[in-house]
Every structure is written in structure tokens, then in C-alpha cells.
């Protein structure tokens, strides 16, 4: 539910899709996927007990970019950050408030020969 909402937000953002098309995947980017591509991993979201624990989650959402060049990875990450930093709204029936973002160390995947950039968002999400 939360992963799908983040993916829908990115797919609805023209300056993101102009760089990656529809190559935004839940959890992992499949081997041999056309790059650049993005993954959204929301398993860091946990029940928020002080609200409705059935529908409210708090925690982190990781979004990663794999690209053939570091410049491409940086461009895609910049577009994602413009779309999501300080975002607050409802997507696919999920209310999302993004509180902060932190990029982690850049990487390189030897197997896929791809540059990697990752941002972790601290967020609150509530199914409506």
C-alpha cells in the first residue's frame, strides 16, 4: 500500500518519468532491467500506536536509483528529491507526510555495472 503510493507519486511526476519512464519498481530492480531505474522499499514503515495502529505507519522509505553513469544517477535522484522532499498529500488512498530525507553513501554494483544513489525518507503514512 505505502510502496504503491510512493511509486504512483513518482509515476505522476513528469520530470521523473522523463528520465526513467515507468521503470520504478517495488523493493528491487530486476537483473537486466533497462537503466536508469528506481526501486521503492517501504518495509521500514511500522505501526504507529498513538494513532490508529491498523492504518497509520511511521518510519523510513528507501528509494534507490541504478544508472549506467553517475551523472544519470544524480539527475534521477535530483528529480526524485524535487518530487518528494517535504511532500504532504494523498496518493492512491494513502495520506503521506515526508518529514526528512537523508542520502546514504553512493555505490557501484559490479554485477549490473551500475552506479547507485539512495535516499532514505522519514515519513508518516495513513490509509484513508
Image (spheres, rainbow, N blue to C red):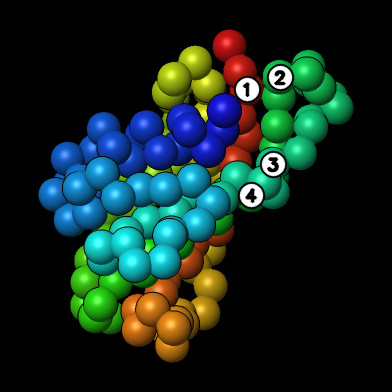
Sort mark 2 into few (<14), some (14-19) or many (20+) by Cα contacts within 10 Å.
some
Residue depicted at 26% across the width and 32% down the height: 12
Q: Place residue 111 in its image quadrant.
A: bottom left
Element on which disc 4 rests: strand
Q: Which residue is mark 4?
A: 60
Q: Which residue is mark 3?
A: 45
Question: Is disc 4 in contact with disc 2, using a CB cutoff of under 8 Å?
Answer: no
Q: Earlier in the sequence, mark 4 or mark 2?
A: 2
Q: Earlier in the sequence, mark 3 or mark 1?
A: 3
How many numbered discs sit on the rendered protein? 4
Mark-to-mark CA distance, 3 and 1: 11 Å
Q: Residue 120, position in %: x, y?
A: 55, 58
Residue depicted at 58% across the width and 11% down the height: 128
Q: Which residue is mark 1?
A: 126
Q: Place residue 64 in its image quadrant.
A: bottom left
Tell me: 106 left or right of 99: left
Mark-to-mark CA distance, 4 and 2: 16 Å
Residue depicted at 22% across the width and 71% down the height: 72
Q: Earlier in the sequence, mark 3 or mark 4?
A: 3
Mark-to-mark CA distance, 1 and 2: 5 Å
Q: Residue 107, position in %: x, y?
A: 46, 82
Element on which disc 3 rests: strand
Amino acid at each position: 500500500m505505502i510502496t504503491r503510493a510512493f511509486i504512483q507519486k513518482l509515476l505522476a511526476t513528469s520530470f521523473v518519468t522523463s528520465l526513467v519512464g515507468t521503470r520504478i519498481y517495488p523493493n528491487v530492480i530486476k537483473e537486466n532491467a533497462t537503466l536508469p531505474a528506481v526501486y521503492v522499499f517501504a518495509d521500514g514503515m511500522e505501526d504507529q500506536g498513538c494513532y490508529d495502529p491498523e492504518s497509520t505507519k511511521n518510519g523510513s522509505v528507501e528509494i534507490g536509483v541504478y544508472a549506467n553513469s553517475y551523472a544519470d544517477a544524480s539527475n534521477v535522484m535530483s528529480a526524485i528529491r524535487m518530487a518528494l522532499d517535504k511532500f504532504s498529500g494523498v496518493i492512491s488512498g494513502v495520506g503521506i507526510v515526508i518529514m526528512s530525507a537523508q542520502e546514504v553513501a553512493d555505490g557501484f554494483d559490479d554485477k549490473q555495472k551500475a552506479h547507485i544513489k539512495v535516499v532514505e525518507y522519514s515519513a508518516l503514512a495513513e490509509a484513508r
